[in-house]
Image (cartoon, rainbow, N blue to C red):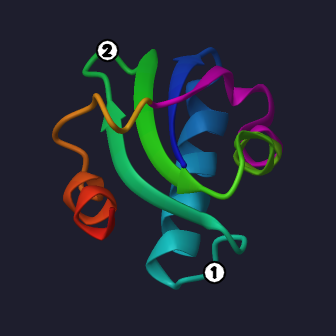
Amino acid sequence: MIISVHHLINDPDRWQQATMRIMALSEHDQLPKGLKGLLFLPGMDGHKADCVWEADSLESLQKFLDREIGTGAKNEYFQVDDASAFGLPVHRELHQAA
């Protein structure tokens, strides 16, 4: 499933440390099983960001990100309706297999 997360950043230092850790895990293929980061969209103001993930469940992604980010941001999660979405990196793959 595709999940979008909206982050309201309230501790920029902690947020920066968390995003660097998460990016390093991703680059070294060390994210928890079932999680794959697709997009990271930080805002210019440093107080908002969005990201898009492929995950086996919303709960597993939420558990991972909330643990990593801690008090650095308030996170809002929702499952994307990938059949109606466009521009997703995996969108073509999902529909070609169908």
Q: Which residues are magenta?
A: 65-80
* Disc 2 residue type (three-letter): Asp
The residue that label 1 is drawn on is: 30
Q: Is residue 76 magenta?
A: yes
- Image location of residue 40, percent across then percent down: 36, 44
The secondary structure type at the circle numbered 1 is loop
Q: Position of residue 55 (x, y in %)?
A: 60, 55
Q: Circle 2 is placed at which residue position?
A: 45
Residue sitting nearer the eye, 36 or 87: 87
The residue located at (75%, 48%) in the rendering is 68
Horizontal and vertical percent position of residue 10: 63, 15
Mark 1: which amino acid? Gln
Instruction: Tell me where residue 92 sits by quadrant.
Output: bottom left
Residue 86 or residue 41, whichever sits in front: 86
**84 relative position to 57: left or right:** left
- 98 in the magenta segment: no
User: Helix, strand or loop at disc 2?
Assistant: loop
Decide: few, some or many residues near mark 1? Use Cα within 10 Å; few <14, some 14-19, many ≥20: few
> Which quadrant would the C terminus be assigned to in this image?
bottom left
What count of labels does the image hold? Answer: 2
On residue 70, which mark appears? none
Observer-nearest of 95 and 59:
95
> Relative to residue 66, is residue 64 depicted above or below?
below
